[in-house]
Image (tube, helix red, strand yellow):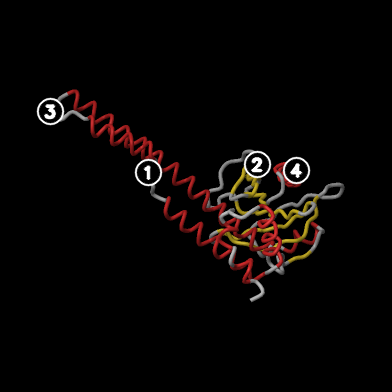
Amino acid sequence: MACEQWQSQLDAYLDGELPADAMRSLDAHYRTCPSCSADALARLQFKRSLKFAGNRYTATPDFRSKIRTKVAARPRRTWGMGWTLATATLALLFAAGAITLYMGRQSLQRQHTYSELADLHVATIGSANPVDVVSSDRHTVKPWFQGKIPFTFNLPELQNTDFTLLGGRVTYLGQTPGAHLIYQIRKHQISVFIFPADIPAPLGSDSGVRQQQTFNAKTWTGDGLRYVVFGDASPADIQNLTNLLKSAAHP
């Protein structure tokens, strides 16, 4: 098979265990080979699903240590006030642990959401036909979505910028439909996802550009919509495209 040499290195590639020059070579191949990119995406989804399931209900080491310490130190023969205080302490610890577990679960769910976005991004840019409406004209791309998704949005004017609009497609996060736009800057392609602001998938609050699943990402809400700018471009490029999108939303 022509791709056998590439597929044999797939696991090491996904785990980031290959030398830099080999990583670049495989990355270039997977971007141009639909068969290998599909295999890479399937393997990546499987690895992430296993990791997410394994960590879903794991208590933190600090919480385990506190519980063991309190249980070992609780009074065995002294009743009354001492027992009441110990019981109250344990109750507080369990409450704190429940809060910690809830926050940890929210963090895992947020990571899982970004994993889905990473899969959508990788699958789209690796596809032979990444977009359904092919145009660099925002006045062509925006109307194409009418009737296909339950909301409208504005797109920025890119004249005198380094960005180029390649087109767009309808996508889904969970069961929620949204717009998936592809922009290019130099040799990098950036996904812009737009969904209703009340999408049930957790994405975090409006903050600076963060690294998510080896990509850079920026998310915010405005005018009832949730935006996510996602790609391997630099944080500065992600932020600049974010600024253009925000300006278009509030002309």
At 33% from the left and 39% from the top, the residue drawn is: 64
The relative height of residue 233 versus residue 121 in the rendered view (above or below) is above
Amino acid at pointer 2: Val
For the residues bearing labels 2 and 4, Cβ distance under 8 angstroms? no
The relative height of residue 129 versus residue 239 in the rendered view (above or below) is below
The relative height of residue 59 versus residue 133 in the rendered view (above or below) is above
Q: At numbered mark 2, what does the secondary structure look like: helix, strand or loop?
A: loop
For label 1, the residue is 59
For label 3, the residue is 77
Mark 2 is surrounded, within 10 Å at the Cα level, by few (under 14), some (14 to 19) or many (20 or more) other residues, namely some
Amino acid at pointer 1: Ala
Q: At numbered mark 1, what does the secondary structure look like: helix, strand or loop?
A: loop
Disc 2 or 1, which lies upstream in sequence? Answer: 1
Q: CA distance from mark 3 to mark 1?
A: 30 Å
Quadrant hosting residue 150: bottom right
Q: At numbered mark 3, what does the secondary structure look like: helix, strand or loop?
A: loop
Image position, residue 209 (x, y; %):
65, 41
For label 2, the residue is 209
- Of tags 4 and 3, the one toward the viewer is 3
Disc 2 or 3, which lies upstream in sequence? Answer: 3
Going by the picture, which residue comes out furthest to the left? 77
Amino acid at pointer 3: Arg
Q: Which is more toward the observer, 62 or 175?
A: 62
Amino acid at pointer 4: Asn
